[in-house]
Image (tube, rainbow, N blue to C red):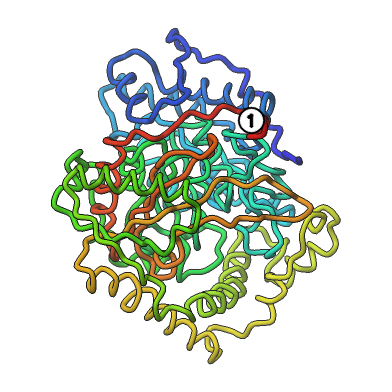
Amino acid sequence: MRKIFAAAAPLLLIAPATAAPPPEVAGKDASALQLEMEEGRTTSESITAAYLERIRAIDDEGPALNAVIATLPDALGEARRLDAERKAGRVRGPLHGIPVLLKDNIEAAGPVPTTAGSLALKDNVTGRDAPLVARLRDAGAVILGKTNLSEWANIRSNGSTSGWSAVGGLTKNPHALDRNTCGSSSGSGAAMAASLAALTVGTETDGSIICPAGVNGVVGFKPTVGLVSRTYIVPISYSQDTAGPMTLTVRDAANLLTAMAGSDPADPATAEADARKADYSAGLRATGLQGKRIGVLRDRIGGRADIAALFDAALAQMADLGATIVEIKDSRKGLEELGAAEFEILLTELKTDMAAYLAGLPAADGPKTLADLIAFNKADPEELRWFDQSLFELAESKGGLDSPAYIEAKAKAARLAGPEGIDRLLGDHGVDLLVGVSNGPAWTSDLVNGDHYSGPGASQLPAVAGYPHLTVPMGAIEGLPIGISFIGPKWADAEVLTAGYAYEQASRKRAAPTYRESVAP
C-alpha cells in the first residue's frame, strides 16, 4: 500500500487539551455521541481524538484495514472551535462536532489531495470544498479525512478488484479480513463498520454505496439524483452520479442527508433540490411501515436458500409491522436492453465529464483528458500491475454527447428504468415501495483474478432511473453481512428512509465486526 499523506500522522498523537476522558466510540452512532456532548459528558475534541487514535490502531496498524487514505491536519482544531461554539450557546444541529470521513473523490479544502485513488491525481490539492462538504461544515461537522475507494470508482476495468487503489492499497472487510469490501465506496463502508468516524460519505453511479454498505454491514443511502450537488466530485456520469450517506443507523443517514441536500447553481440537476429537500429525520417513526404496500423483487434475490431465508424473515417482520407484502415475479420483463443502454451512457459520459472535471482543476499542469489518464497509466508500472484499463480505452473510443448511439441509449435507459421500470412495477402492483436483497456474502479478495461477485443485487434500476435506494442490515451468512434494499419513486427519499427505519428498529440486525482473519476455520 502507498499511503502518501504522512503529514497528517502526527495529529494522531496529540491528546485533546480538554479534561474530558476519551469517549468510547466503537459501535456508537452519531446521535448517541451528540447526546453525550449535549449532556456535557464529552466534547467534539475528545471524540475526534478518539477516532484519530482508532485510525492509527485499526487502520494503519492492527488489522490494517486501509480504509482511510488521509486525515485532515486541522480536524482537532476544528473540533475545538465547535466546542467553543457549543460552550457559547450555539449548536448548529445534530451534526455539530461530529467527525465525518469523505470518499476520496470528493474535494475538501485543506492540504490533502483528492485522488480518486489514482497516482495521476496524487498532487490534486485544489483548496476547494465540494458544495456538499461546505454544507456539512455549515452544519457543524468535523471533516476528519478521506477514505480509500475502488480506483476511479471502479470504472477503469472489468477485471478490477474492488477496494483497491494505487494510492490506498487494498481495503479489507472488518468482518473477515480476507473478504472484499465491494465498491466503489469501499473505504467509506469499511471505515463506518469499524467506527473510524461517526459518519461517512460515499458516492454511487450504480451500486457503489449500496453494495459496500451491505457487504460491510452498515446503512447506505443513494438519494434521488439531483438532491445532492456533484460539483467538485471526480465524475463518471452526470446522469447517474450522486453522493450519499453511509452510517450505522438510518437516523444518522437521515441527518447526514438533511445537511448535504440542496440546490447548486453549478449543477443543473439540483435545480429542484431546495424545493424538494426536507428534514429527513423528522418523519422517522417505528410505525413507518404500517399501512404500506411493499412490492417484493422476488426474481432478483438469487438462488441461495440461506439468503432467501433471511429475506423471508425480513418480509415477515415487515408484515408484523403492518405492511402488506405483494410478490412481484416479473420485475425484469421488458428490461432486457437496459444494461447495454446504461453501459453506453456511462462510457460516453465518463469521457466528457472527466475531461470537464480535469480541465477545471486549479493546477495548470496534470492530466486534462481521459486520454491523458490512459497515457499516465501506461507509463506508471504500479497503476496497471493488477488489472488493465480496458474500460478507459473503450470510453476514449466513444463519440461525444451528440453521438446517435449515446442519444438513443440515453432515451432508452430513462424510459426503461423509470416509466417502464420502477414506475411500472409500483403502479401495476399497487405498491408504495419495492424491496429486494442488496448483496450476497462478501467474496475473498483476489488481486490476481479480480472480483468474483455473484450475489443478488437491486441497484441497477434505481441507479439508472436516479431514484432513491436504501440498504439496511438484514442479517449475516457465516458472519458476512447481508443487506435489504428499499426502493422508491423519484423524490420519495423521506418515504424510503422512513420504511427502512421502521424495519431497522424492529429487526436490529447490525452486528459489530470481529476483525477475524478469515471465515475458514
Residue sitting farthest toward the left: 291
Question: Residue at the spot x=43%, y=78% of the render?
Answer: 335
Question: Residue at the spot x=36%, y=37% of the render?
Answer: 249
| x and y, in percent, of residue 494 in the image | 25, 52
Please identify the quarter of the rendering in which residue 444 is found. top right
Q: Nearer the viewer, residue 82 or 295?
A: 295
Query: Is residue 418 depicted above or below 509 in this figure?
Result: below
The number of discs equals 1
Q: Circle 1 is placed at which residue position?
A: 59
- Position of the C terminus, as image quadrant, is top right
Q: Nearer the viewer, residue 278 or 290?
A: 290
Residue type at mark 1 is Asp
Q: Does residue 434 appear left or right of residue 44 in this picture?
A: left
| x and y, in percent, of residue 173 in the image | 60, 38
Query: Is residue 105 depicted above or below 198 in this figure?
Result: below
| x and y, in percent, of residue 83 in the image | 38, 22
Q: Does residue 250 appear left or right of residue 339 in this picture?
A: left
Q: Nearer the viewer, residue 62 or 270?
A: 62
Please identify the quarter of the rendering in which residue 59 is found. top right
Question: Residue at the spot x=49%, y=81% of the render?
Answer: 337
